[in-house]
Amino acid sequence: MIDLREVRKGRGYTQFELGVLTGLGQTGIAKAESGDRQLSPEATIRVIRALSLSPTEAWAVPELAFEPPDKSMHPSRAVT
């Protein structure tokens, strides 16, 4: 496995540059790299595209993994 920071640096981007490219901002990238923030599926796709990662490369980066939403908490299942 390789972490997001290594991939970003390997592609020659600063946190600021990747944040601009993805719309996440420097703070968002920093939090994702440190594990303080889990990226949404949409943000994950933006990061993968910005870094030009292949599917195989993307699967090797733990910070780009995401958990599907808990369907039991879906508004359509709310008890009224």
Image (spheres, rainbow, N blue to C red):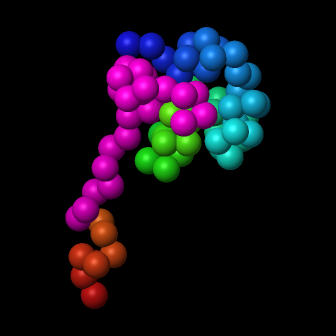
Q: Is residue 66 magenta?
A: yes
Q: Is residue 48 above or below residue 69?
A: above
Q: Quadrant of residue 30?
A: top right
Q: Number of marks in the image?
A: 0
At 55% from the left and 17% from the top, the residue drawn is 7
Q: In the figure, is residue 57 to the left or right of 24?
A: left
Q: Nearer the viewer, residue 53 or 42?
A: 53
Residue 53 position, x and y percent, is 49, 26
Q: Nearer the viewer, residue 28 or 21?
A: 21
At 44% from the left and 47% from the top, the residue drawn is 41
Residue 29 position, x and y percent, is 63, 33
Q: Quadrant of residue 10?
A: top right
Q: Quadrant of residue 31?
A: top right
Q: Quadrant of the N terminus?
A: top left
Q: Is residue 70 magenta?
A: yes
Q: In the figure, is residue 70 to the left or right of 22?
A: left
Q: In the figure, is residue 73 to the left or right of 32?
A: left
Residue 32 position, x and y percent, is 55, 32
Q: Nearer the viewer, residue 55 or 63?
A: 55
Is residue 34 something one can see in this rendering?
Answer: no
Q: Is residue 27 above or below residue 15?
A: below
At 41% from the left and 21% from the top, the residue drawn is 57
Q: Quadrant of the C terminus?
A: bottom left
At 55% from the left and 42% from the top, the residue drawn is 46
Start-end of magenta stretch: 49-72
